Image (tube, helix red, strand yellow):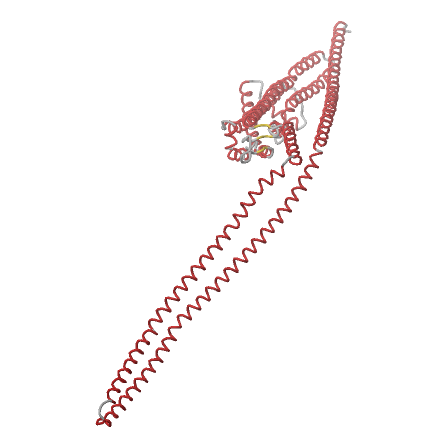
Amino acid sequence: MRSISRFSWFLIFLVAGVWIATSFLEASLEIVSFKVAAEVVNELLSGQSENVSDRTFVFTLAAWIVAVGAGLLVAYLAVYGLIVPFQIDQATRMLKSAKDRKDFTANYDDLHIKLAKHSLLGRAWREFDETLVKPGFGSKPAVIQNTTRPNVFFNAELVRGHSFGLKMMPSIPGYFVGTGLLLTFIGLVLALDTAGTAVTTEDSSEMQAATRKLLEVASFKFSTSIAGLGSSIVLGIVFRSIGIWIETAFARLCEEIETVLLYRSPQAISVEMASDLKEQRDYMKDITQGDFFQRFGQEFEPRLQNAVSGAMAPVISGIQAAVEELSSQSRQGAEDLLGKFTETLHEGAGTEMRELAKTFEGIQTNLSTLQDALGETSRGFGGDMERVSSTLTASLAQATETAEAFNTAARRLERSTAPLLESGTKISEAVDKMEASLRTTTNALETEQQAVASLSEKLAAQMKEQEALWAQYAERFQGIDAELGGALEQLSKATREQGERMHEYAVKVDKGLAEAVDKLRGLLGGLDENTREFGESVEQLAEALRNGRNLTDERLDDPL
């Protein structure tokens, strides 16, 4: 519920309380008539004051004071005595839903969203969340820690700072006292004015009537003071109770927050920092004075070897695979080349040679036939010569065919050498590929060599930087003791200055209280003086009445 909403509810309860109290008083008391009071007020506004001392009007004014007090009582009880503590307890119940600190840490995100949207505590919770230390991964303890007490953020000032009604609440009882006394003194002034006019008359009966009326008016004029004082007392008790209820609700909330959070005071943080610095100092001494670098070299050397071996293993494997593939391709290419050459030779040259052998066999047969024919008789010389001529012609034809066969064999041999040339080309391409692979491998090895050289240079530079860094750390930690001493001295100085400030503040507060008491004493002295003056005025009035009565008696005794 926002502040404007609370103010609206406050007005609703105020009007309702005043109306209920007014109706109740008018119905239960015969001397209270708001109609008569309204008529007298209209007369006063028109300049007539004859009925100001009317008993009904005076008691109605007192009833009005009581009714307004009752309305304020109902409004404050409803809005600030019930609604505000209920809202605070609602946030407390949210925190109580967590079983322990670990459960609260696990469900913190959901609870934070709800509390950040709380109508009364949302802004304070968001500010308080900024002071919390959330646990990181693997941190100990694994719970949320607070570095500031919750009551710094959650207190009655949180509600009072944004509420006009709570700021006015302590002053309202005093206003009722002042209102009652003001109405009483106004009535007494008017009554004394009327009585003074009656005293100047010489008629004793009129003087007695005026005196009687003055006493009656003085008696019931104090009813407004009684109503104001009574309302002030009741409102003071109720308002103080409302303040206590709000403070108690905040105390319960802070107690529950302390239950689900782990508080880390600045002193504990300082002690922890001092302990960590001491451990770091000892560790740095061990680094600068011990065998740290020897152990570092022993640990770093095998790891460097493993890293280089791991980086070079793929390169070596690639080279081995390339060599094996090249060897396999070369062997397979040579075998294919020899197979194709043998097959071509068998298919081409072998066939031609067989045909040539057959041709020579035919020639040998023809020569044998020719030799046999020459041994015959000369009888058939002419015919034989013709046969010889035909045979020679046939032989020439066969020789021509043989030459053509040789040409055909030559062409076939040429065709058979084409696969051999192709195989040679493949071998040349394989050799080129192998050369390129070897060149790539060589480049990769050169690159790896350069990378290893660069890595060595970087490691050397890193070692130099580490040596310089450790030297700087050694120089810094040599002054840790002096710095800690200075820090403790500053802390002691700050504590002493804080104590002096608290002493000065206490002196100022004491002085302020003394001044307030002096002012209150002066106010009470003035009130006492006014009371004495009022008593003296009453005594003077009584003496004047006695003198008037004596004068009346003397006139009655002396008729002349």
Q: Nearer the viewer, residue 25 or 47?
A: 25
Residue 28's place in the image compared with 289, above or below, is: above
Q: Is residue 151 among what the camera can see?
A: yes
Q: Position of residue 438 (x, y in %)?
A: 51, 59
Is residue 275 placed above or below 202 in the rendered structure?
Answer: below
- Image height check: is 282 above or below 434? above
Quadrant of the image containing the C terminus: top right
Number of numbered discs present?
0
Q: Nearer the viewer, residue 365 or 319?
A: 365
Could you say which is closer to the camera, residue 385 or residue 302?
A: 385
Point out the image quarter for the N terminus. top right
Quarter assignment of residue 220: top right
* Horizontal and vertical percent position of residue 129: 58, 34
Query: Which of the 4 image quarters holds residue 250?
Result: top right
Q: Is residue 4 visible?
A: no
Q: Residue furthest top?
A: 557
Q: Residue 125 falls in which quadrant of the image?
A: top right
Instruction: Please state if 256 lies on the left or on the right of 554 as rendered.
Output: left
Q: Position of residue 2 (x, y in %)?
A: 56, 33
Residue at the image point whose x is 63% and y is 45% from the top: 462
In this picture, is 238 found above or below 117?
A: above
In front here: 379 or 423?
379
Horizontal arrangement in the rendering, residue 35 relative to residue 353 (left or right) = right
